[in-house]
Amino acid sequence: MKNIGDISFNGKRVLIRVDFNVPLDENFKITDDSRIVAAIPTIKKIIDEGGKAIIISHLGRPKSGYEERFSLKHIVSYLSSILKTNVAFNDDCIGKNTANVVSKMNNGEVLLLENLRFYKEEKLGDKLFAKKLSELADVYVNDAFGTAHRAHASTAIIAQFFPNNKYFGLLLEKEITSLEVVLKNPKKPFTAIIGGAKITGKIDVILSLLDKVDNLIIGGGMAYTFAKAAGGNIGNSLVEEEKISLAKELIDLAKVKGVNLCLPRDSVNANKFDNSAKTNTSEITNISDGWIGLDIGEKSIRDFSEIISASKTIIWNGPMGVFEMSNFEKGTKKIANAICKATQMGAYSLVGGGDSVAAIKKFGLANKVSYISTGGGAMLEYLEGKLLPGVDAILS
């Protein structure tokens, strides 16, 4: 794997693709700095060796051209403070003015360029746009795992313009290494915990995991589609009617493959989608009409925790319930605690996906798992066995 330990950066212009797609509040303050913090070791190594760090990223989903709320200028002061050096900002990412600013950089300096997605060519994987970006630098480093599954100009296309000078950043290398642990040589029993609202988007990873895991735990909103597939009454709970037959197939397939598919037995229900709603607990297959399942119940927590405690390799993607509401966070919190306890006992635990990461941070457990992935979609696609364009571009 070509990483940044293989090159001296002194005097070189280094284009670093990071993932600074961080959430901002209405005052443009960063509410979760995880992705910025994760990229700091790569940036610091480059500038400490005398390289000129030219940082490129996207932020949000601008529709057409410049949008104030998606400008990377909002990141500058925080990035400067965390790097402990002045970070310059340029209000474009290509063009003569940008090239001129780069040409005046001194060794060890940092320049952040404006949001790549202000150009539609970025998402289109436009070759000319990639070429214009490439002309700013001598070396290309990809450290953006969160977008490695996208064939965008700055993640996949640009690498061809650096045939001998393209490298994995420290974060991207660590992400791949961590995923390889669970894919190539997982210690048994191997347990995957898949939650979240819908089966849609996670079908392929579930199918792939059925060939690898001993236990597959299903929680969150998607569990109610499985409960209905099993002939249950789920009241007014979230359900993907068009996926009921698929859920039945997955239940049958797990049996054929000898995988212990673990579905919740009970459900914490509310009479409306509100933290102050009236609640009750029932079997997940016997929820009264007018009630919505919003969390797993005590029996499910106990079942899942027992399986997790006996596991040696654990993947977690997706919460068990609506953990953002305090009255429906217990299932997710207890499962997170079970994962942390298993880790303490020697299991390898990998947590990924925005909601899972948000949950484990909310509960103050981020430092008690083996690894937290910065890319939900990229992590899922890698687990599916897909080749990630951003990774393949460096390897090829």
Image (spheres, rainbow, N blue to C red):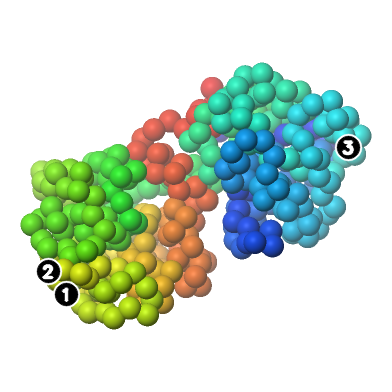
Give the residue at x 69% y 39%: 66
Under mark 2, the amino acid is Asn
Q: Quadrant of the N terminus?
A: top right
- Can you identify the residue that label 3 sits on? 105
- Can you identify the residue that label 1 sits on? 282
Circle number at residue 341 = none
Q: CA distance from mark 3 to mark 1?
A: 64 Å
Near mark 3 (Cα within 10 A), the count class, few <14, some 14-19 or many ≥20, is some
Q: CA distance from mark 1 to mark 2?
A: 6 Å
For marks 3 and 1 on the same chain, the one whose residue lies earlier in the sequence: 3
Task: Single out the mark in the foreground, 2 or 3.
Answer: 2
Q: Is residue 344 visible?
A: no
Near mark 2 (Cα within 10 A), the count class, few <14, some 14-19 or many ≥20, is some
In what element is the residue under mark 3? loop
Residue 72, image x, y percentages: 71, 47
Q: Is residue 133 above or below residue 148?
A: above
Give the residue at x 39% y 33%: 386
Residue 232, image x, y percentages: 10, 61
Give the residue at x 76% y 29%: 94
Image marks 1 and 2: residues in contact by CB distance under 8 Å: yes
**Residue 114 is drawn in which quadrant?**
top right
For marks 2 and 3 on the same chain, the one whose residue lies earlier in the sequence: 3
**Residue 124 is drawn in which quadrant?**
top right
Q: Is residue 333 above or below residue 240?
A: below
Near mark 1 (Cα within 10 A), the count class, few <14, some 14-19 or many ≥20, is some
Under mark 1, the amino acid is Ser
Task: Single out the mark in the foreground, 3 or 1.
Answer: 1
In what element is the residue under mark 2? strand
Q: Is residue 372 visible?
A: yes
Circle number at residue 286 = 2
Q: Is residue 147 left or right of residue 3?
A: left
